[in-house]
Structure formats: structure tokens, C-alpha cells
Amino acid sequence: MYLKLIEILFGVFAFILTLLMILREFGITKNLSPMKASDYVSSMAGFMFAYILFSFILATFIPGGINKIVLALFGFSPFIIGKLVTYQKVKTYSFLQILCVILSIVFVYAI
């Protein structure tokens, strides 16, 4: 029962995070004032934190060893990608991060 609730919350936070990252990539923050852009990025960081937190909670309680490892990797993916990113390739890694979040949603609801 609780596992299903955690899966739903994970899906909601991951979906909202995906939308926020896609809008960021299409340049919505370029049209915002610096204060609103800062608020936007801060809210995106909050959803990223919730995504990471719920992926680790799911990795703890979900059955199956492989499932635990895959979810933990999805939880670590923002840190791994953040370590690899350079200023010249920030768009590529942003799309890679969006892809990771979408794949994690698909993975959680496929198992």
C-alpha cells in the first residue's frame, strides 16, 4: 500500500521535474526577470531533490536486487551527469538528464 503511494509520488515529482527541465531548455527563463528566473530554478532544484529522495526510498523498498540497483542509479544520475558536464556541452547533458528522468518514470511503472 505504501509502496504504491511512493511510486505515485515519485511519478508526480519526476513528471513535474521533466516539464520544468524541458521548459528551461526551450528558454522560458530568458523571458523572465532575474528574480523570477531564480525562483524558477529554485523550484526546479526542489523537485530534483524530491526526485532523488523518492528514487532512493523506492530503491530501498522495491523488491528485486536489479530493480534496487537501477533505481539507485537513477537517483545518482543528476550527480553523475553534473560531474561530467562542461559549459560547452550543457545542452547535451541537459537532454541526457531529461531522458534519464523519463526513463525512470517508465521503469517504475513497468515493474
Image (cartoon, rainbow, N blue to C red):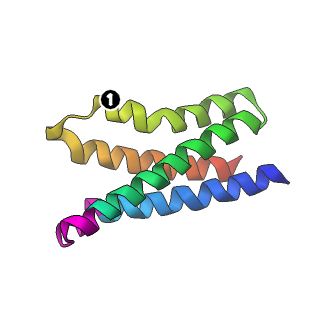
Evaluate whether residue 31 shows in this view.
yes
Please give the name of the residue rendered at 46% of the width and 45% of the height, measured from the top-left corner.
100
Please give the name of the residue rendered at 71% of the width and 46% of the height, measured from the top-left corner.
111
State the quadrant of the N terminus. bottom right
Tell me where the magenta segment starts and ends, as one range. Answer: 24-37
Please give the name of the residue rendered at 33% of the width and 35% of the height, measured from the top-left corner.
82
Q: Nearer the viewer, residue 33 or 7?
A: 33
Disc tally is: 1
Query: What is the x, y in percent for residue 70?
Result: 60, 33
Image position of 107 (left or right of 74): right
Q: Note whether 85 is above or below 102 in the view shown.
A: above
Q: Residue furthest right?
A: 1
Query: What is the x, y in percent for residue 25?
Result: 27, 59
Q: Examine the residues drawn in magenta and state their main secondary structure.
A: helix
Q: Residue furthest left?
A: 88
Q: Which amino acid does the dot numbered 1 rest on?
A: Lys
Evaluate whether residue 26 shows in this view.
no
Query: What is the x, y in percent for residue 91?
Result: 23, 48
According to the picture, the residue beneath numbered tag 1 turns out to be 83
Asked whether residue 53 is drawn in magenta, I would say: no
Please give the name of the residue rendered at 81% of the width and 52% of the height, measured from the top-left corner.
2
Quadrant position of residue 29? bottom left
Q: Residues within 10 Å of mark 1 (few under 14, many from 20)?
A: few
Image position of 29 (left or right of 23): left
Q: Nearer the viewer, residue 96 or 23?
A: 23
Q: Nearer the viewer, residue 23 or 38?
A: 38
Query: What is the x, y in percent for residue 7?
Result: 69, 53
Q: Note whether 55 is above or below 37 in the view shown.
A: above
Q: Nearer the viewer, residue 107 or 82?
A: 82
Q: Helix, strand, or loop for circle 1?
A: helix
